[in-house]
Amino acid sequence: MQLLSSLLLSFLLVGAEAAVPKNKYNCTSFIVRVPIDNVTLIDLPFPPFADQYAATAFANQVTIRTPSVPKVNLSSLTTTFNISAEYCTPAVLGPNSSTLHVLTHGLGFNRSYWDFYLPNATNDAEYSYVNRITGAGYSTLSWNRLGIEPSTIADPYKHIQTPVELATLISLTVLARAGNISQVPVPKKVVHVGHSWGSVLSLGLAALAPQVTDGIVLTGFSGVSDYQNLFIAGTSFHLASENAPARFPAKQYSTGFLTWADKSANQYAFFNYPHFDPAVLAQAEATKYPFTFGEFFSATAIPSKAPNYKGPVLFLAGEADLIFCGSNCTGLYGADSATVKAFNGSSSVETYIQPNVGHGINLHKNATGAYDVVLDWASRHGL
Ligand SMILES: *[C@@H]1O[C@H](CO)[C@@H](O)[C@H](O)[C@H]1NC(C)=O
Ligand SMILES: *[C@@H]1O[C@H](CO)[C@@H](O)[C@H](O)[C@H]1NC(C)=O
Ligand SMILES: *[C@@H]1O[C@H](CO)[C@@H](O)[C@H](O)[C@H]1NC(C)=O
Ligand SMILES: *[C@@H]1O[C@H](CO)[C@@H](O)[C@H](O)[C@H]1NC(C)=O
Ligand SMILES: *[C@@H]1O[C@H](CO)[C@@H](O)[C@H](O)[C@H]1NC(C)=O
Ligand SMILES: *[C@@H]1O[C@H](CO)[C@@H](O)[C@H](O)[C@H]1NC(C)=O
Ligand SMILES: *[C@@H]1O[C@H](CO)[C@@H](O)[C@H](O)[C@H]1NC(C)=O
Ligand SMILES: *[C@@H]1O[C@H](CO)[C@@H](O)[C@H](O)[C@H]1NC(C)=O
Ligand SMILES: *[C@@H]1O[C@H](CO)[C@@H](O)[C@H](O)[C@H]1NC(C)=O
Ligand SMILES: *[C@@H]1O[C@H](CO)[C@@H](O)[C@H](O)[C@H]1NC(C)=O
Ligand SMILES: *[C@@H]1O[C@H](CO)[C@@H](O)[C@H](O)[C@H]1NC(C)=O
């Protein structure tokens, strides 16, 4: 009874927070042709899932006590993808505007994760990283990862694999730095900000192409992989085309496109009760995007350590992150942790645990508190 009433009380307090006024920022959306050259692919050692039963059975195999590593053949991919991106600046440019935040979203979202509004509260910017960061004068470039329309919906088994996604992020960054994206002025500095899978890719970029970044911010991420099976179990590899056929028709989204069942599965993996607005959960579920089999299958094919990256790093964790911390991040980011040691050549590694929030940091109450942690870090590191 005591517990129940204190939960109710905290829910009321959380619900009572005021709206965040929207700053003036201008955004432009466009398609960038992003080339990738000779990227290693893993040939699937078994046929694509025939149906939902096969997909769910594979989820069992991934989470088995005695995992086996199949022998695979490698091949390579050289191609050009269409990447949907959005460039935003403050309406009035200032000294910070030549620093570009490249924003890479995680599984289950499109780039709107970084600029999230409830449909009935489009002037309340409490969930918009873009609003807060452009409000401090910076520019942002967010992009829809491969498989997320209108970016190329490539083959989710053969081509949407982790090394391909990483090569795409590196190539997009190189294009922006070279002034080869006509909508994006050449930035003086580039900060890579990831969420979850986007952090996995941003870390990979720091490892493979440390010269193209000046700052790394990894949100919703740790170097601990022990709890990722909870995410897999929580999705049981629902086929996107069966779960949401109107949005993900089987013709376009083969059995390699996966998702979770419903709003409750979404809450389990991404949200920490009661520190979110149920309307936000409903909106996140209604606008979710699939992840791919290829991403999982090739997840360990990119580096998870970046010893040659020299610049500053910020880890921004959600206190109750299920996927990367087993719902308790406290104690996992010490100086001796694998997470921090992944950047042993960095000038500075800082860690911050945002109180009360789950994995989907931007979609919780007090998200702007987390954005301010990034701004404070940036100003202290001359970014
Ligand atoms: C592609 O990369 C592989 C190593 O990953 C290398 O052996 C091969 O020579 C490369 N091919 C071309 C055409 O660059
Ligand atoms: C690898 O390629 C060889 C030669 O094409 C083939 O015989 C073998 O079955 C392949 N192995 C796998 C695991 O696909
Ligand atoms: C942003 O848009 C407003 C209104 O169209 C315009 O007056 C302003 O110059 C734009 N700012 C930038 C930096 O493009
Ligand atoms: C990219 O877009 C162009 C123009 O819409 C289209 O012709 C092409 O097939 C697309 N390429 C890929 C790889 O999606
Ligand atoms: C940028 O565009 C120029 C002119 O088309 C080209 O020469 C150069 O190779 C491009 N650079 C990159 C990184 O794509
Ligand atoms: C928006 O709609 C949700 C239900 O979807 C409701 O809970 C919330 O109070 C509404 N917010 C506003 C500002 O009207
Ligand atoms: C993100 O997804 C939602 C839901 O499909 C859609 O309304 C929105 O336009 C998408 N945004 C981008 C940037 O693709
Ligand atoms: C989280 O873990 C820390 C350190 O192991 C522990 O002190 C703390 O009580 C845990 N928090 C919760 C909510 O269980
Ligand atoms: C940093 O870590 C790498 C492995 O990622 C290791 O090879 C290297 O010796 C370490 N450097 C220092 C200074 O400890
Ligand atoms: C909001 O976030 C900031 C930054 O982490 C923190 O200092 C503050 O205590 C948080 N507020 C609440 C009500 O949790
Ligand atoms: C630039 O950003 C920093 C935060 O990183 C902020 O403290 C500073 O006020 C900003 N400068 C301007 C001119 O907006």
Image (cartoon, grey):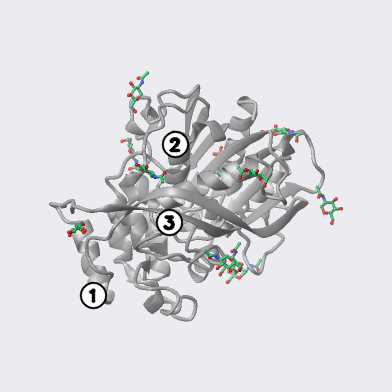
The reply to whether dot 2 and dot 1 touch (C-beta < 8 Å) is no
Tell me what residue is drawn at x 43 percent, y 40 percent: 204
**Of tags 2 and 3, which is closer to the observer?**
2
Please state which amino acid type lies under the numbered disc 1.
Answer: Tyr
Which of 46 and 268 lies nearest the eye of the viewer? 46
**Of tags 1 and 3, which is closer to the observer?**
1
Residue to which mark 2 is pinned: 208
Sequence order check, earlier mark of 1 and 3: 1
The quadrant where residue 224 appears: top left
Helix, strand, or loop for circle 2?
helix
Asked if residue 269 is positioned above or below residue 259 in the image, the reply reads: above
Task: Give the spatial CA distance, label 1 vs label 3.
Answer: 25 Å
Q: Is residue 324 left or right of residue 112?
A: left
**Is residue 259 in view?**
no
Which of 248 and 381 lies nearest the eye of the viewer? 248
Sequence order check, earlier mark of 2 and 3: 2
Point out residue 73 in the picture as x, y percentages from the top left corner: 24, 53
Task: Give the spatial CA distance, label 2 vs label 1.
Answer: 38 Å
Residue to which mark 3 is pinned: 270
**Is residue 295 in view?**
yes
Asked if residue 32 is positioned above or below residue 189 in the image, the reply reads: below
Residue to which mark 1 is pinned: 53
Helix, strand, or loop for circle 3?
helix
Task: Give the spatial CA distance, label 2 vs label 3.
Answer: 29 Å
Please state which amino acid type lies under the numbered disc 2.
Answer: Leu
Please state which amino acid type lies under the numbered disc 3.
Answer: Phe
**Of tags 2 and 1, which is closer to the observer?**
2
